[in-house]
Image: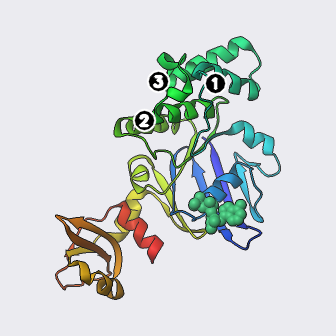
Amino acid sequence: MNTLSISNLSKTYPNGVEALKGVSIEINNGLFGLLGPNGAGKSSLMRTIATLQKPDSGSVILNQINVEEHPQYIRKSLGYLPQEFGVYPTMTAEILLDHFAVLKGISDRKTRKERVDYLLDQTNLFQHRKKKLGGFSGGMKQRFGIAQALLANPSLIIVDEPTAGLDPTERNRFHNLLSELGQEAIVILSTHFVDDVKELCTNMAILNSGELLWKGSPQQAINEIEGRVFSRQITRNQIHDYKEEYSVIAEQLFQGKPLIYIYSESDPGQGFLPVEPDLNHVFFNKVHS
Ligand code: ADP
């Protein structure tokens, strides 16, 4: 079992933006969802864990080793899958993966070939290994990204905004792969897609404006707002008034008419009906309250 302990991390950029404000979380093996809107501080946190930038204060400890003091340890133990994997369009999957393996320090040719073949197989790319990466679909590129992230057998895998641009089949396949990885390693999924966290993660945290607003399991989060989410249909020109009066957490169209969802400690009456809360309601309630 691996353990990542993040304690009291703070970071203010030279322009004065406080990107992290005393963030503390402990994460074990499995899929952990780091959820937050754009600008919440997710990338700042991921980059700090990966030792790509230093915090102003606080610490990151992986398996009892302080990563700031031993950056080599984390770089060896970390698989990082960035949002956009800058692939080399004219190289084949097999050759590029072999090249990355050399960079990771796997110098023995036979060991390297075994590792590359194994990862191509695990990410369902073996039959495409001789194809140029420029011709890969979005899903294949993501899986190639995973294969390179796994080269060094990481105990911690960071995945940044993973499923943008994947079709449902590719997304499903990618999710299955991540779930498998979570059995052996800590996998942190940094995303603003609530549904990815709902489907995959056993634990999660919500980050907003550099602050950790909530941590726990998705189910716990939903249980906490059970009985406090209500909805009703309104007319388009009422939206503004309702926003003034209620804590509106979502709006959507239903049969062409606006439907609003509100958070309320007690039954608001006024034609509102209680609804089963989901993780989207939790997210918008935490982030907008
Ligand atoms: P997220 O990944 O959740 O979108 P970021 O960590 O990228 O959030 O950004 C958090 C805040 O810090 C934002 O307001 C962003 O504009 C700011 N920020 C990020 N990186 C830098 C930087 N290198 N210099 C100055 N401000 C930055």
Residue 182, label in figure: none
Mark nearer the viewer, 2 or 3:
3
Whole-percent x, y for residue 70 in the image: 81, 46
Q: Could one spot residue 217 in this view of the protein? A: yes
Lower position in the chain sequence, tag 3 or tag 1: 1
At label 2, which amino acid type do we have?
Asn
Measured in 3D between alpha carbons, the distance from the residue under mark 1 to the one under mark 2, in whole angstroms, is: 21 Å
Depth check: give the residue in front, 185 or 78: 78
Whole-percent x, y for residue 11 in the image: 72, 66
Q: Which residue is mark 3?
A: 124
What SS does tag 3 mark? loop
Lower position in the chain sequence, tag 1 or tag 2: 1
Whole-percent x, y for residue 124 in the image: 47, 24
Mark nearer the viewer, 1 or 2:
1
Residue depicted at 47% across the width and 16% down the height: 127
Measured in 3D between alpha carbons, the distance from the residue under mark 3 to the one under mark 1, in whole angstroms, is: 14 Å
Q: Which residue is mark 1?
A: 97
Q: Which quarter of the rendered picture does the N terminus lie within?
A: top right
Whole-percent x, y for residue 225 in the image: 35, 70
At label 1, which amino acid type do we have?
Leu
Direction from residue 194 to residue 96 in the image, left or right:
right
Image vertical order of residue 107 relative to residue 285, above or below = above
Q: Quadrant of ligand 1?
A: bottom right
Measured in 3D between alpha carbons, the distance from the residue under mark 2 to the one under mark 3, in whole angstroms, is: 12 Å
Q: Residue furthest right?
A: 69
Whether the residues at callouts 1 and 2 have beta carbons within 8 Å, the answer is no
What SS does tag 2 mark? helix
